[in-house]
Amino acid sequence: MATTNDLKNGMVLNLDGQLWSVTEFQHVKPGKGGAFVRTTLKNVLSGKVVDKTFNAGTKVETANVDKRNMTYLYKDGTDFVFMDGDTYDQIHVPAETVGGGADYLLENTEVVVAVHDSTPLYVELPVTLELVVEHTDPGLQGDRSTGGTKPATLETGAQIQVPLFVNTGDKLKVDTRDGRYLGRAN
């Protein structure tokens, strides 16, 4: 148990049997009346975001969420298999839990897996990954000055938009949060 005065970003609360991650909080002391805490909470499983206000000092139940550095090994049916580098334990994470990050997962990618009561809650990928372009149409001579983009398929199968000068076989930096091209990798 903790009080609303102890809230921090990233803390996970257990409210009415559901897990909510604190994404923002603000302590407010109005001129009249008691102090309160405004929070923005994100449901860990569904991703739903809600605003909730607590009276200052109210007790809230915190959830014990264990964030572990793990390595992605392989895909087993619809599950993704990750291994803890310290204990060598392997866990199966359903595709729904991995979410859109699955588009950028390569074998041996280091990720953070959040686990609560031996149930994987979510997978955090590194913000940027270096991936090779599997296929893209060649840019036409003279197109380079327009600043246009073209689709490219990465080695993971993900489709992203890249500048016209990018060729098949180039290694690119990609933002895993939204699939943006960030530049060429060295």
Image: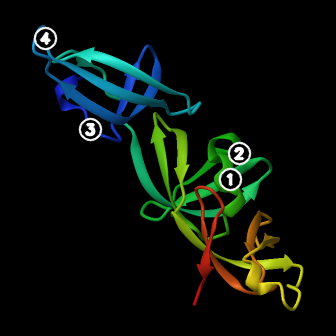
Q: Residue at x 52, y 60 (%)?
A: 111
Name the amino acid, label 4. Answer: Gly
Residue 8, numbered circle? 3
Name the amino acid, label 3. Answer: Lys
Using a 10 Å C-alpha cutoff, classify the residue at mark 4 as few (fewer than 14 neighbours), some (14 to 19) or many (20 or more). few
**How far is mark 2 from mark 3, CA to CA?**
29 Å
* Quadrant (top left, top right, bottom left, bottom right) of the C terminus: bottom right
Q: Position of residue 175 (x, y in %)?
A: 58, 65
Query: Vertical placement of 165 versus 13: above or below?
Result: below
Using a 10 Å C-alpha cutoff, classify the residue at mark 2 as few (fewer than 14 neighbours), some (14 to 19) or many (20 or more). some
Q: Earlier in the sequence, mark 2 or mark 1?
A: 1
**How far is mark 4 from mark 1, CA to CA?**
48 Å
Name the amino acid, label 1. Answer: Phe
Q: Residue at x 47, y 42 (%)?
A: 115
Using a 10 Å C-alpha cutoff, classify the residue at mark 1 as few (fewer than 14 neighbours), some (14 to 19) or many (20 or more). some
Q: In terms of depth relative to the viewer, which is nearer, 61 or 9?
A: 9
Between disc 1 and disc 3, the foreground one is 3
**How far is mark 1 from mark 3, CA to CA?**
30 Å
